[in-house]
Image (cartoon, grey):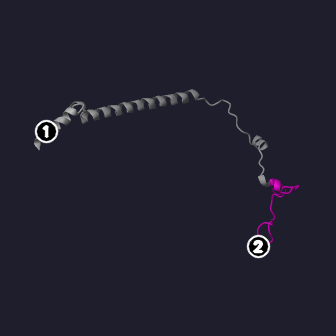
Amino acid sequence: MKQTDDSLRERIKSSWPYEVNEKTPSFDRVWQAADERYTSARRRYRYVASAAAVAAVAVIALNWQSPAEETSYIEIAELLESTSWVAPSDVLLPDRKFDIYQDMPVLFESTEPAGGALL
């Protein structure tokens, strides 16, 4: 049996295309190569991130404008004259000749002791 095992081992060894110990790298060499690839990738990432930060600062610095000396303020009268708002449902209401809020600014009080306004 021993002879058969030895002959089988020799046949497999001779038919193998390369010597296992010579071609297979050690675990330490594989780990070191992976660590070097990781380190170079991190370094490349740092360079790209630094370049992007410098570019962003440059763009902000170039677009920075000092505030104008004459700042124009919005006058309330101009704002009230230039804007108006109408409810979308106003077209459904009948036309009246008076505005209850403008023509009667004070609401009449009820004559009942616990009552509210006369509207």
Q: Is residue 51 left or right of residue 66?
A: left
Q: Nearer the viewer, residue 87 or 119?
A: 87
Number of the front mark, 1 or 2: 1
Q: Is residue 85 above or below residue 66?
A: below
The amino acid at mark 2 is Pro
> Which residues are drawn in magenta?
90-119
Residue 33 picture location, percent across and down: 30, 32
Residue 24 picture location, percent across and down: 25, 33
Location of the C terminus by quadrant is: bottom right
Location of residue 77 by image quarter: top right
The amino acid at mark 1 is Asp
- Farthest residue in the right direction? 97
Q: Nearer the viewer, residue 52 or 111?
A: 52
Q: Nearer the viewer, residue 83 or 34?
A: 34
Mark 2, other Cα within 10 Å: few <14 / some 14–19 / many ≥20: few
Q: CA distance from mark 1 to mark 2?
A: 120 Å
Q: Main secondary structure of the magenta part?
A: loop
The disc, 1 or 2, on the residue closer to the chain's N-terminal end is 1
Give the numbered dot on residue 113: 2
Mark 1, other Cα within 10 Å: few <14 / some 14–19 / many ≥20: few
Is residue 98 found inside the magenta-colored segment of the image?
Answer: yes
Is residue 20 found inside the magenta-colored segment of the image?
Answer: no
- Mark 1, residue position: 6
